[in-house]
Image (cartoon, helix red, strand yellow):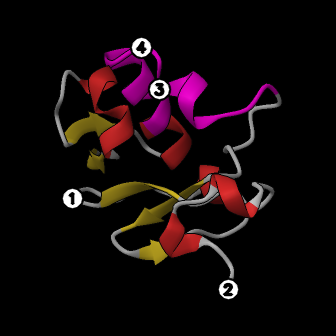
Amino acid sequence: MAVTVRIPTTMRPLSGGASTVAVEGASLRDVLAALDAAHPGFKDRLFDAEGALHKFLNVFVSDDGLSPAWHDQIAKAGAELIVAHVPDADAAPSALPRRNRPA
């Protein structure tokens, strides 16, 4: 099933500058594997050494948050997978952009 993956700006060099990429996959795990196969480098940018999604990323399907077992979630044809950066919760306040710093 074709799923559109929205690529965050900081990862667009991996997709040749494209803001969206259409890939096939039965589950979200398959979709992200297909993304890495089509555009090598995404796996390292999305997952840590244990295979968990990096803590500074959120993934949404058509604006809905994912369940704890997100990687086995069925990929529906026409769905949009959104990869979004979030500020590092462990970052020192001075390392955060001014708009994200605690008061």
Amino acid, disc 1: Gly
Q: Nearer the viewer, mark 1 or mark 4?
A: 4
Query: Label 3's element?
Result: helix
Q: Quadrant of residue 58?
A: bottom right
Mark 1 or mark 4: which comes first in sequence? 4
Q: From the viewer's perspective, tell me whether residue 88 is left or right of residue 41.
A: right
Q: Nearer the viewer, mark 4 or mark 2?
A: 2
Q: What residue is shown at x 68% (from left), y 58% (from top)?
A: 94
Amino acid, disc 3: Phe
Q: Which residue is mark 1?
A: 78
Q: Which residue is mark 2?
A: 103
Figure check: 39 above or below 32: above
Figure check: 100 above or below 78: below
What are the residue bounds of the magenta stretch?
32-49
Q: CA distance from mark 4 to mark 3?
A: 6 Å
Question: Do labels 1 and 3 touch, CB within 8 Å?
Answer: no
Q: What residue is shown at x 55% (from left), y 40% (from top)?
A: 29
Amino acid, disc 2: Ala
Q: Which residue is mark 3?
A: 42
Question: Do labels 4 and 3 touch, CB within 8 Å?
Answer: yes
**Neighbourhood count class around disc 3 (C-alpha, 10 Å): few under 14, some 14–19, many 20 upward:** some
